[in-house]
Amino acid sequence: MTDELKSRLERLGERAPESTDAVERLRRARDRRNRRRARSALVVGLSVAIAGGLVIVNTIGDGGRGPTPGESPTVAAAWELPATPYLWPENWARPGDRELLASVQDAVDAGTPAVEWRLDPEQVVRRFLATVLAWDDPRVDEIDALAGGRVFVAAPPCPGNAACERQPSLSLVVDQPGEGGDGGVWSVVSATSEDLQTRSPLGMSPALLAGSQVGFELALPEGRSAHAGLVASNGCREASGFALALESGTSTLTVPAVEVEDPSCGEVGAGYLFVYAMDDTTVPTGDPLLEAAAIEHPWLTMLPVEVQMGVEPADQAPA
């Protein structure tokens, strides 16, 4: 573990303490993970069964072709999406966070007290609410359990600690992106507000196309504006797009693109889409997962997305 990872791990330990789409997206991610594991098992079985000097080549990203004469049989492994998305505390769209997530799991396995809270999905939800939304002692209730994942609803404390007759809530999905079971760490996968909805022609599946438009349906109280963004990485490069000072109604955001530089870059990137509300006189900070923002009701929607972000260089585009 590098000194930088140790420092980030210590900072993680010091952090202060509509769901249907999010749940369906989590189920689809889990289905993809199972299919990838099945393909991996098939490749291993074939490599054992085939005798002689044949070479089994990872076909992801090379169109399924084998090595050509004069070409080295050693092919760089293509960057792949994590099997399960995760957005907080680590984020699947930041390549360095994969190593950090593994380091957190190692620390949990070693019994490090600073990260014990990662074993409790409700504590992960509460830390997220405290860190990203600055909620102090929110109401948090679990409403559903998936095969490995959990769904919670949360609401901020009532003003003056008085009883609230009906208070809007935020829906959150958490899952275990690495090791499962009692010893696996939990991460926030999504948070959704019913007043900050997203839509796209592809329904967020299988992947958003670079250059396409993601739509937002926003219901904002008077004196509030929304700020949206999409960040993605293909393992080599990151791309981002933002739409600021959005009003109630329908708005759009263009899905960013990057150029695929070499075979190890993934054409499909790991990304996250977010939109949050602030007082319309407050200057936005950009990405609320990287820098604290004065987020107000209706708070925040953030979703993991896959982005078909590879584009041809201009000088290689077909005539």
Image (spheres, rainbow, N blue to C red):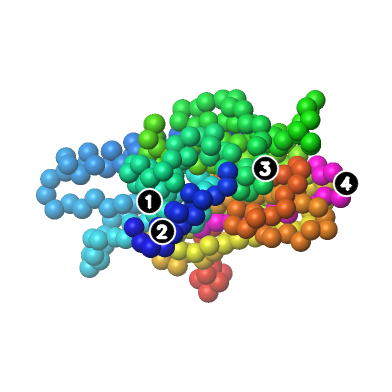
- Disc 2 residue type? Leu
Secondary structure mainly formed by the magenta segment: strand
Residue occupied by mark 2: 5
Would you call the spot at circle 1 few (<14 residues within 10 Å), some (14-19), or many (20 or more)?
some
The reply to whether dot 1 and dot 2 touch (C-beta < 8 Å) is yes
Magenta-colored stretch includes residue 40? no
Mark sitting earlier along the chain (3/4) = 3
The reply to whether dot 4 and dot 1 touch (C-beta < 8 Å) is no
Magenta-colored stretch includes residue 223? yes
Residue occupied by mark 3: 135
Q: Secondary structure at mark 3?
A: loop
Would you call the spot at circle 4 few (<14 residues within 10 Å), some (14-19), or many (20 or more)?
few
Q: What residue is shown at x 48% (from left), y 34% (from top)? A: 120
* Magenta-highlighted residues: 219-233
Alpha-carbon span between mark 3 and mark 2: 27 Å
Residue occupied by mark 1: 103
Mark sitting earlier along the chain (4/2) = 2
- Disc 1 residue type? Ser
Alpha-carbon span between mark 4 and mark 1: 45 Å
Q: What residue is shown at x 66% (from left), y 31% (from top)? A: 139
